[in-house]
């Protein structure tokens, strides 16, 4: 005789108290939603109040990436351990009552502990700097930011060490910025290495600026490479500045090329400075060309300095020409230095 099939267990019925609580909880939720939707204060504080959230408790360790906080008053909020990337929190109104401990930023941290740590980093030798940051990384405490890593990269003794700290930066989940990449480009041994960092910058979605391209132009092996980076700069829509053109003029093979960059500088509406004319004078083939650039300098209203006259004396064909430039130097009220005296002495010997 077969056994009767097992009976299906009956579903547990909710208690009378639970059944009574459901409509109450649902009603509470609907009221909360209604308060949020109808509140006239759409600031993060107003929405928090409408939702019944406590700024001192309910904003810790949460994902706020992309929530607009720029220009808002976040005094009294505790964002400990929260993801504040892409929020514009750096432009929010905050004070000592705002807590940012171990929060994640897409720029410099606002955590006072991180700011204090970065200040200490600047004042210690590189080997101590490395040890301090390594210790912090191993501790699991997020008391570092983009400034911490960029500072270590800047102080690195060579390109390989700088690259290693960039890798550590990535492992720690800290986003590099334009200064990080400019520093890495500056550390590169040559144009090829700098170009690789530019590619990495593009992959990271970091927009280059005028300092980026001025650094790349400076890393170029010659005028042709410098011109290519200038074209790339124009394609990127980045406006050159006086440092950009001074570097391009310096990269020119001779006076003719330097003069072309000076013309480009004028077309771009960038005002030359004393370094511009000192470089142009230095690029001149002889004293006559140097004198023309000095005249151009006067027309532009740029005051010469001791380097200007030292270069002009160096370009003089002999002692008489150097003496004339020394007289001009005195008229301009520019004090001579040791290089001036050496330049004059050399011209006397050569005579």
Image: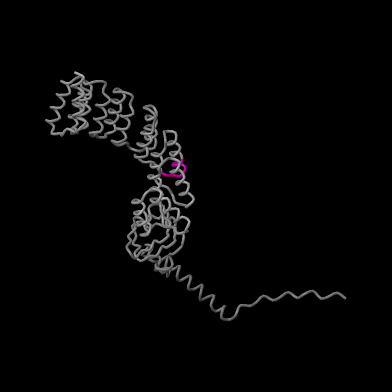
Residue 194 percent across, percent down from the top left: 42, 36
Residue 8 percent across, percent down from the top left: 73, 74
Residue 84 percent across, percent down from the top left: 42, 57
| Colouring used for the render | one colour
Residue 204 among those drawn in magenta: yes
Residue farthest front in this picture: 349
Q: Magenta region: which residues? A: 200-206
Residue 194 among those drawn in magenta: no
Q: Which residue is more in the foreground, 88 or 336? A: 336
Residue farthest bottom in this picture: 16
Q: Residue at x 45, y 37 (%)?
A: 196
The picture quadrant where one finds residue 349 is top left
Locate the N terminus and report the quarter of the image it occupies: bottom right
Q: Which residue is more in the foreground, 202 or 234? A: 202
Residue farthest left in this picture: 331
Residue 9 percent across, percent down from the top left: 71, 75
Above/below status of 224 relative to 58: above
Give the side of residue 98 with respect to residue 23, left or right. left
Q: Which residue is more in the foreground, 199 or 313? A: 313
Locate the C terminus and report the quarter of the image it occupies: top left
């Amino acid at each position: 005789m077969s056994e009767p099939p097992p009976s299906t267990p009956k579903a547990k019925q909710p208690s009378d108290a639970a059944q009574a609580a459901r409509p109450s909880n649902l009603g509470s939720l609907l009221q909360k939603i209604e308060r949020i939707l109808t509140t006239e204060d759409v600031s993060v504080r107003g929405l928090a109040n409408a939702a019944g959230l406590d700024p001192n408790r309910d904003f810790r360790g949460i994902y706020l990436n992309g929530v607009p906080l720029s220009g808002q008053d976040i005094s009294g909020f505790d964002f400990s351990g929260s993801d504040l990337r892409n929020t514009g929190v750096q432009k929010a109104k905050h004070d000592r009552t705002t807590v940012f401990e171990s929060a994640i930023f897409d720029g410099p941290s606002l955590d006072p502990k991180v700011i204090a740590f970065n200040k200490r980093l600047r004042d210690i030798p590189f080997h101590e700097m490395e040890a301090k940051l390594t210790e912090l990384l191993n501790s699991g405490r997020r008391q570092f930011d983009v400034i911490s890593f960029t500072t270590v990269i800047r102080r690195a003794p060579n390109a390989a060490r700088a690259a290693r700290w960039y890798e550590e930066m990535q492992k720690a989940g800290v986003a590099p910025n334009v200064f990080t990449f400019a520093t890495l480009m500056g550390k590169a041994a040559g144009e090829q290495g700098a170009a690789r960092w530019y590619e990495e910058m593009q992959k990271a979605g970091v927009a280059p600026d005028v300092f980026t391209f001025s650094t790349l132009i400076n890393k170029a092996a010659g005028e042709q490479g410098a011109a290519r980076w200038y074209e790339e700069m124009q394609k990127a829509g980045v406006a050159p500045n006086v440092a950009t053109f001074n570097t391009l003029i310096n990269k020119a093979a001779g006076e003719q090329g330097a003069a072309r960059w000076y013309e480009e500088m004028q077309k771009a509406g960038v005002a030359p400075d004393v370094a511009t004319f000192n470089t142009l004078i230095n690029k001149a083939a002889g004293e006559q060309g140097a004198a023309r650039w000095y005249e151009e300098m006067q027309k532009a209203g740029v005051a010469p300095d001791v380097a200007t006259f030292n270069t002009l004396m160096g370009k003089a064909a002999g002692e008489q020409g150097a003496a004339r430039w020394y007289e001009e130097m005195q008229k301009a009220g520019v004090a001579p230095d040791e290089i001036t005296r050496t330049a004059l002495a050399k011209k006397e010997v050569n005579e």
